[in-house]
Image: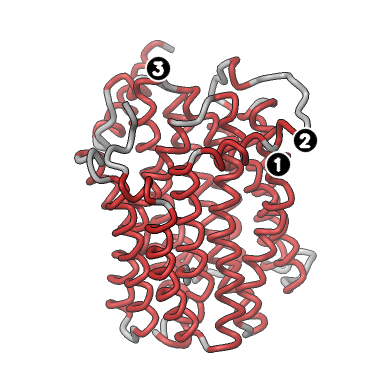
Amino acid sequence: MVARRRRQDNEGLALTSMLNIPKPLRLQRDFRHFWLARVMLTAGFQIVSVAIGWQIYALSGRVFDLGLVGLLQFLPRIALVLVAGAAADHLDRRSIAAVSMALQAFAAALLGAASMGWGLAPSRALIFAVAVLLGACRAFDMPAMQALLPALVPKEQQAHAIGLSASATQAAIIVGPALGGLVYAFGAGAAYALNALLDIVGLVLLLGVAVPAVTRQVARPSLASMLEGIRYIRGERDLLGAISLDLFAVLLGGATALLPVFARDILHTGPWGLGLLRAAPAVGALAVAVWLGHHPIERRAGAMMFGCVAVFGAATVVFAVSTSLMLSLATLMVLGAADSVSVVIRGTLVQLETPDALRGRVSAVNSLFIGASNQLGEFESGVTAAWLGTVPAVALGGIGTLLVVGLWMRWFPGLRARDRLLRG
């Protein structure tokens, strides 16, 4: 047993040394298992997103259905945000995330069985129902996972842990879509089966994480306590500005839902091309995350955030008018790199400036904003594309993002002038 544990630790050291992790973090088995579980969960969700997008568009040929999938994932998140946040602050956060992962594995297995002709037949109704279930699961697992992380490492190492966790997420967002697109070539059922497998592996890893007692509070939540996360964000102007800027930038400028249309009808590629398109933003984001690991944001954090969101909007416009796969991939990488800076700033503010007693509720509100920018943004993209056409809809979204940057610089001067990311 001693030799086995020493081998596991050596493997963990080899893995984490390549990622520039502080030595104390390398030795923490619980953090390592949590990190890998988050990779599995994120990669699995990316795979199922690629599969659902391609399959629903193949079944109906309607751009609007791509947006409807996003809306159906978002509605449970807004309905459950207060409950999910309170649960993350008053129940075992590991158990919440574990149940969510088990349900997501079941959803993927259900779609896989239908796609392979085992019982149910693949249909729009089935895909829409699974989209609702996935949205409900994400409403609970995102705040639970975000709130659990700081409890697994000492306070002085939390910034490094948050950065590593963000890098893990970006790595999974790169590998997941590309892998999903490649596996989809063997059929939708293969992609869904792979998603279910990753969720199960992640579940096993997460159950092996020892949860500190601080994450298992027993006080009964009330409506007033559920609303405390919203009140806290409203009182923190910099935090409110960072979260809302990201919300409206991605809500207007996001083109993820329409990537199947670009892949098939504009760039004339197949599922493998869709996988590359979905992975490209994360490639840029991961590159920036690695660079920030060696060159952390120390000065002019607010100006850098606004500048990068403006680059995000401009890159969206270029992507909209591109008819070259290589140019589209390059533009999406730039877009992802710019967005990564916003993610790092917002994530640091949420995790380090929020008391642990409120972290679940604040993380739930933050995840709702993320969901609004992603899933609701997908619906907005689908609707505007159905009205105006795919290319005009995405181009106008990028222009709208640039307008939002100008307005937020005026409305949140404190965030614009913020120099250091961490106070004191």
In the image, is 381 to the left or to the right of 92? left
Q: Nearer the viewer, residue 85 or 298?
A: 298
Give the residue number, with chain letter if any, for mark 2: 223
Amino acid carrying mark 3 in the image:
Arg
Q: Tell me the distance, in whole angstroms, between the alpha carbons under discs 2 and 3.
A: 46 Å
Residue 82 marker? 1
Measuring from the top left, give residue 278's x and y in whole percent. Answer: 43, 66
Name the mark nearer the viewer: 1 or 2. 2
Residue 69 quadrant:
bottom right
Amino acid carrying mark 1 in the image:
Leu
Give the residue number, with chain letter if any, for mark 3: 5
Indicate whether 27 appears above or below 88.
above
Q: Residues within 10 Å of mark 1 (few under 14, many from 20)?
A: many
The residue shown at (57%, 47%) is 367
Q: Tell me the distance, in whole angstroms, between the alpha carbons under discs 1 and 2.
A: 8 Å
Q: Earlier in the sequence, mark 1 or mark 3?
A: 3
The residue shown at (36%, 31%) is 159
